Amino acid sequence: MKKIALATAFSLAASTAFAGGLSDPIIEDPIEVETSSSAGGILVPLLFLVIAAAAASS
């Protein structure tokens, strides 16, 4: 009889432990930072030209 009472107690405790269920995770939006430069897209080609000129002169 003690085993039945113990099993009942454990089953009641287990069912109340999961009564709330799983909640949906909170996912925050990623932070996007826009950077503006006065050089625009010309900085990389100019840097390439400087490096190419330095290599050609040596």
Image (cartoon, grey):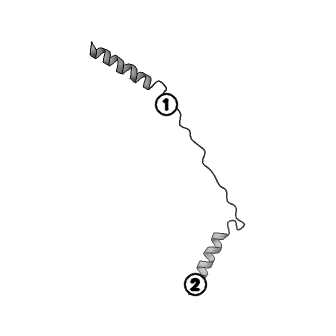
Q: Quadrant of residue 8?
A: top left
Disc 2 and disc 1 in contact, CB within 8 angstroms: no
Q: Where is residue 19 in the image (x, y as percent from the top left)?
A: 47, 24
Q: Which of marks 2 and 1 is in front?
A: 1
Quarter of the figure with the C terminus: bottom right
- Classify 10 Å Cα crowding around label 2: few (below 14), some (14-19), many (20 and above): few
* Residue 17 pos. (x, y %): 43, 26
The amino acid type, in three-letter code, at marker 2 is: Ala
Foreground of the two, 15 or 53: 15
| Viewer-closest of 18 and 39 | 18
Amino acid type, residue under disc 1 in the picture = Leu
* Above-or-below relation of 11 to 42: above
Q: Earlier in the sequence, mark 2 or mark 1?
A: 1
Asked if 1 appears above or below 48 in the picture, the reply is above
Left or right of 29? Residue 7 is: left
- Residue that badge 1 annotates: 22
Disc 2 is placed on an element classified as: helix
> In the structure shown, which secondary structural element does the residue marked by tag 1 occupy?
loop
Q: Residue 26 placed where, x, y %?
A: 56, 38
Q: Which residue is drawn at 67% across and 59% down?
A: 35
- From the image, tell me which residue sits under label 2: 56
Q: Is residue 20 above or below residue 41?
A: above
Residue 31 location (% of width, % of height): 62, 50
- Left/right placement of residue 3 relative to residue 58 reads left
Q: Distance between the residues labelled 2 and 1?
A: 65 Å
Label of residue 57 in the image: none
The residue under the point 35% across, 21% down is 10
Q: Residue furthest right?
A: 38
Disc 1: CA contacts within 10 A as few (<14), some (14-19) or many (>=20) = few
Q: Quadrant of residue 51?
A: bottom right
